[in-house]
Image: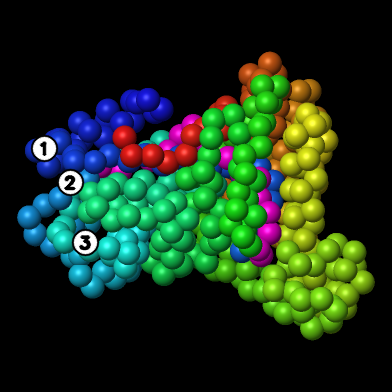
Amino acid sequence: MVNEAVYKELIAKYRGVFGREPEVVAYAPGRIEVLGNHTDYNDGFVLSAAINCGTFFAAARNDGNSCRLFAGDLMKEAVFDTEGICRSTSDTWQNYVKGTLAGLADAGAVKCGFDGMFLGNIPLGSGLSSSAALEMSAGMALARLYGIEVDLLTLARIGQTAEHTYAGCKCGLLDQISSLAGREGCLVKTDFRSLEYELVTLGNDACFLMCNTHAKHALTDGAYNKLRAACEHAAEHFAGVLRHPVKALRDVSMSEWVLYRGGLDALEADRAAHPIGENERVLRGAGMLVSGDLEGFGSLMFDSHESSRRLFGNSCEELDVVVDAAKKIPGVMGARLSGGGFGGSVVVLAHPRDAEIASAALAGAYAARFGKACGVSVITPAAGAYVL
């Protein structure tokens, strides 16, 4: 079993709190975004992967309508009713489960309360989407508990709505789909207009290093939503000046951006250029992986980070230091920020034989600048969410 030690800890804590066994346990992994930054809500393309760390959610029905929810790491409890679920302004970790339960209630009957607990090993604020892992593990467990039938895409949308309505972050569907659709050794290439996805084999000559800077990664403070609003406004502009339909920035090419960006202020033009360029990089990158061109794929990752840094404004000094160091390390083929940005983690593409030396070099470069090493771990693409 993946992350068996975490599972055993959860079960022991569940027994200790509730005095019985859970009826159901589900697991959902975090994700890395390898290429395609902020393209999901622009109807674009993303290459991502489910990763080898995630969150377990255990639950059993109880006799009332009250839901008792424990965060297994903090051992803090939240209590709420199955009726009239509302957003909490304290202990906000509960909002991801509340929103997921509310979405499931729209799809089927929630006839009683539950006793639940979750525990995972995804570093919070690392950009690896611990929130989606919680939503998808809770969604799978509670759907099974209540006998509610939902397909994977519906479950992903329930998680997205939980983020929008309960957590206050207008995210796309990248995190949820990646957590559900991953497969060992593969990247997930998703078209976020059709919501169709396919698996692209990474191969045995590459692995990922995840460098957690521990810099602030909080997207509910409005930064993410402002970037999304800028993209939506830019799409409206291009819809008015181009001679073909434009529903989102996915419909605008980089050559069209160059010719028709006049009328946008300089900042919004830059913001729009990033997802437009990212879409083109994802499509090129998928082809490179099929042909085995890992070096070319890595170059696109470096280009992606530079676009985040110079055009989209969602990088920061800590992330830039790691990427700049990665460019100088033998065996490293590419690096870029992963996730929403503004802190969190850098994903690095490296040869497995060079992973140990590259990890030490990255941690050392970060320590030389900031006085402490960043956390570096080897990440492998893993299977998606499931009920145990």
Check if mark 1's residue and mark 2's residue have beta carbons within 8 Å: yes
Picture disc at residue 110: 3
- Nearest the eye: 267 or 178: 178
Q: Is residue 71 visible?
A: no
Left or right relative to 87: residue 221: right
Residue that numbered label 1 is attached to: 20
* Disc nearer the start of the sequence (1/2): 1
Q: Which residues are magenta?
A: 42-58
Q: Secondary structure at mark 1?
A: loop
Q: Residues within 10 Å of mark 3 (few under 14, many from 20)?
A: many
Query: Can you say whether 32 is above or below 88 in the image?
Result: above
Residue that numbered label 2 is attached to: 60
Residue ID at (54%, 30%):
184
Q: Main secondary structure of the magenta part?
A: strand
Q: Secondary structure at mark 3?
A: loop
Q: Nearer the viewer, mark 1 or mark 3?
A: 3
Query: Can you say whether 198 is above or below 234 in the image?
Result: above
Between the residue at mark 1 and the residue at mark 3, the CA separation in whole angstroms equals: 21 Å
Q: Nearer the viewer, mark 2 or mark 3?
A: 3
Picture disc at residue 105: none
Q: Specify the quadrant that holds the N terminus.
A: top left
Task: Tell me where residue 132 appears, x and y as whole percent.
Answer: 45, 51
* Disc nearer the start of the sequence (2/3): 2
Left or right relative to 317: residue 214: left
